[in-house]
Image: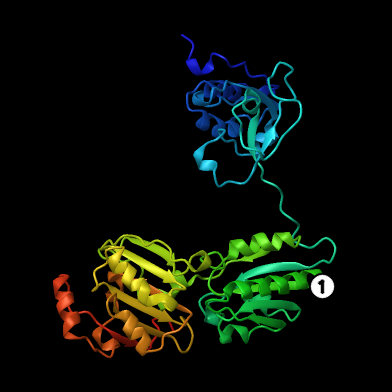
Amino acid sequence: MQHPSTRSRRPIAVHPSPSSIVLLVLAMMMMTTTTTTTTLLLLPVIVAPFDSVVAFVPTHPAKGGRTASSSVSSSSLLRAAYIDEGHPRDRHRVPTTIVPDRGDADADAPSSSSSSSPPSSSSSSSSSVVRRAIGSRPPPVHPTSGGRITLVGAGPGSPDLLTIAAHRIISDPDAFVVVDRLVSDEILNLVRGETRIANKHPGCADIAQDEIYRWCREGVIAGRHVVRLKIGDPFVFGRGGEEVLEFRKFGVEPRIVPGVSAAFSAPLLGSIPVTHRGVSNQVVMCTGYGREGTSPDLIRYHEEQTVVFLMAVGRLRSLCVNLVEKAGYPEYTPVAIVERAGCPDQRTVVGTVGTIADIAEENDVRPPSTIVVGEVVNVLLTEGDFAITTTEEEADAAGAGGGGGRRRGLLVRSMVD
């Protein structure tokens, strides 16, 4: 008996090469499966050797749609990601492009193409292959001015933790370096070209970001090599992806030079491993600030979990309250803050979820700082590393949690010299 999903389908029309018969058979087998999405995702791999292929896109039965076919080139299939019309997972994807049927005289697709409009309930909307609009990247060098942009990660702060590529680029006397205030003075001292520093502070970050974009645009128009220097790794809570999209509007595709992220290097420099067998088997990275100053959702407490917060010291007190009230963290959970990791004046402040906000305020902890939450804080640090000021309340809370006395104090030392 014929499978219900294939009753209204037409046969595949292909022009195979002599060595492609086996792949053709596999393609026909895949077209008879009941899972449309799986078929369409695997189809580009299967039809690569063929000049053309007829692709079927069945609409959802609930919409009253019927099966349609469309002839597209195999090169288009390889470049495009096919999707089932109206699938929920595509709500946030880029606009789609409708590829009309032009190679099959009997097909139901319209003769002209349409784009970006949502699928309608009419049969005409179901008679086309839906393709993601991928677009193209601009050239790495501006075609008119010759300007270019390099997005460089500066690491946590120490010049010794710069990559060789980053050091070479910022040492170029012809580079136009655009940087924000969190990059350390030790790294800025290595810059040989012109430098412009944006003053990014809480509450005015968007204004400073617009200023950065304006400087970068001016540099590209002037035909200069613009070096956008960012702390840590640009793509780890550093708006690196946003900046790439903005730079493309200038007509250039930036070169990316990764940096050492503070999410992993700062804890190590503060004598804290983010994982340790029997103590922590998972790591979660979070930011302290979402878009428009919002607070991101917190992961629920797990005893063998380490959470690393970047850019969160400015709202440390409210963060600790939310960890207890919304994420179920015990107040005795160890917390460490590594300030200016890798720099000569690095400090590591240690306490608990219930005490760290007061300790940070007493010691005037400032950005750039990395916050580590979890039992790994206590793995390598010893009592002799700190000025111990454990209170009776803390000792009682620690005892209630089944652990030993919890430390609070200040460590002015780096594990890695």
Quarter of the image holding residue 369? Answer: bottom left
Residue at 32 percent across and 84 percent down: it is 358
Q: In the figure, 204 relative to 90: above or below?
A: below
Residue at 60 percent across and 39 percent down: it is 81
Q: Which residue is mark 1?
A: 222
Q: In the figure, 242 relative to 70: above or below?
A: below
Mark 1 lies on a secondary structure that is loop
Q: Position of residue 151 (x, y in %)?
A: 64, 68
Horizontal side, residue 254 vs residue 44: left or right: right
Whether residue 253 is visible, yes or no, is no
Q: Position of residue 385 (x, y in %)?
A: 29, 87
Quarter of the image holding residue 317? Answer: bottom left
Amino acid at circle 1: Ala
Q: Position of residue 142 (x, y in %)?
A: 79, 62
Whether residue 217 is visible, yes or no, is yes
Residue at 57 percent across and 76 percent down: it is 204
